[in-house]
Image (cartoon, rainbow, N blue to C red):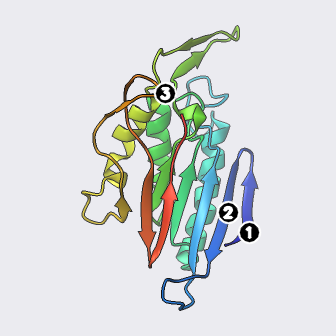
């Protein structure tokens, strides 16, 4: 895998990866853009608009650059890796989805540690946090159509479409490890809790 940074803006970094291997020893190239640590909602005081939220602006600029590359057929797909949100609030996941939907190529999200326990940080520095890690359930509901292997155009495998009992946390949650296949390449993705 050859990695080259194409853009670093604030906390979001877009990277292209070219993999030259094929199961039949024929050279192939797969160009993937990675966007990571989006932290949508961080420092935005509940206002997720372009003008009021720096992470929204940062992601919008990264998406514009990726779309320009995809117009040149240089990007096959995008992996948006956690932390997608700042505090795992459903409105932050919805904003991430809204922005990622503007990509011209398929995208695949992966959870990070900020995407697990929804919380609100108050001006005095105190937090209101949920007792359970519900962010993975928000993630599952917001992105299910992309990750479901039941979708007609999906190249995703092994992503569950139902809640499972999670022995580590003793409640039901989405297990969010899955595999994406492109042009005889298989990429395994997974989040954290």
Which quadrant of the rendered structure holds the N terminus? bottom right
Q: Is residue 89 above or below residue 123?
A: below
Q: Going by the image, does 143 lie left or right of 88?
A: left
Query: Looking at the picture, how far across and down is residue 6, in whole percent?
Result: 72, 65
Spatial separation of the CA atoms under disc 2 and disc 1: 6 Å
Instruction: Return the residue nearer the eye: 87 or 62.
Output: 87
Mark 3: give few (<14), some (14-19) or many (20+) Cα within 10 Å: many
Looking at the rendered structure, the secondary structure element under dot 2 is strand
Query: Looking at the picture, how far across and down is residue 117, in whole percent?
Result: 52, 24
Furthest-bottom residue in this view: 26
Dot 2 corresponds to which residue?
Answer: 15
Q: Is residue 66 above or below residue 91?
A: below
Q: Quadrant of residue 121?
A: top right
Of the image marks 3 and 2, the number of the one nearer the N terminus: 2
Instruction: Return the residue nearer the eye: 62 or 115.
Output: 115
Spatial separation of the CA atoms under disc 1 and disc 3: 32 Å
Q: Are the residues at dot 2 and dot 1 in contact (C-beta closer than 8 Å)?
A: yes
Residue at (51%, 49%) from the top-left corner?
A: 190
Residue at (43%, 26%) from the top-left corner?
A: 134
Q: Quadrant of residue 55?
A: top right
Of the image marks 1 and 3, the number of the one nearer the N terminus: 1
Mark 2: give few (<14), some (14-19) or many (20+) Cα within 10 Å: many
Q: Quadrant of residue 30?
A: bottom right
- Of the numbered discs in the image, which one, if any, rests on residue 4? 1
Residue at (31%, 53%) from the top-left corner?
A: 148
Q: Are the residues at dot 3 and dot 2 in contact (C-beta closer than 8 Å)?
A: no
Instruction: Return the residue nearer the eye: 120 or 161.
Output: 161
């Amino acid at each position: 895998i050859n990695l080259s940074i194409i853009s670093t803006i604030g906390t979001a970094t877009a990277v292209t990866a070219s993999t030259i291997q094929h199961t039949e020893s024929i050279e192939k190239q797969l160009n993937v853009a990675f966007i990571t640590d989006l932290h949508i909602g961080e420092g935005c005081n509940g206002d997720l608009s372009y003008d009021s939220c720096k992470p929204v602006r940062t992601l919008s600029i990264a998406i514009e650059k990726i779309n320009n590359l995809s117009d040149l057929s240089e990007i096959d797909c995008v992996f948006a890796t956690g932390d997608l949100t700042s505090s795992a609030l459903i409105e932050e996941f919805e904003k991430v989805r809204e922005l990622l939907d503007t990509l011209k190529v398929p995208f695949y999200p992966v959870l990070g540690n900020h995407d697990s326990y929804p919380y609100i940080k108050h001006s005095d520095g105190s937090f209101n946090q949920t007792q359970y890690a519900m962010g993975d359930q928000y993630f599952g509901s917001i992105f299910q159509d992309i990750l479901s292997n039941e979708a007609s155009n999906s190249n995703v495998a092994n992503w569950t479409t139902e809640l499972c009992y999670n022995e580590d946390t003793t409640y039901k949650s989405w297990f969010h490890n899955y595999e994406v296949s492109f042009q005889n390449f298989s990429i395994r993705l997974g989040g954290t809790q």
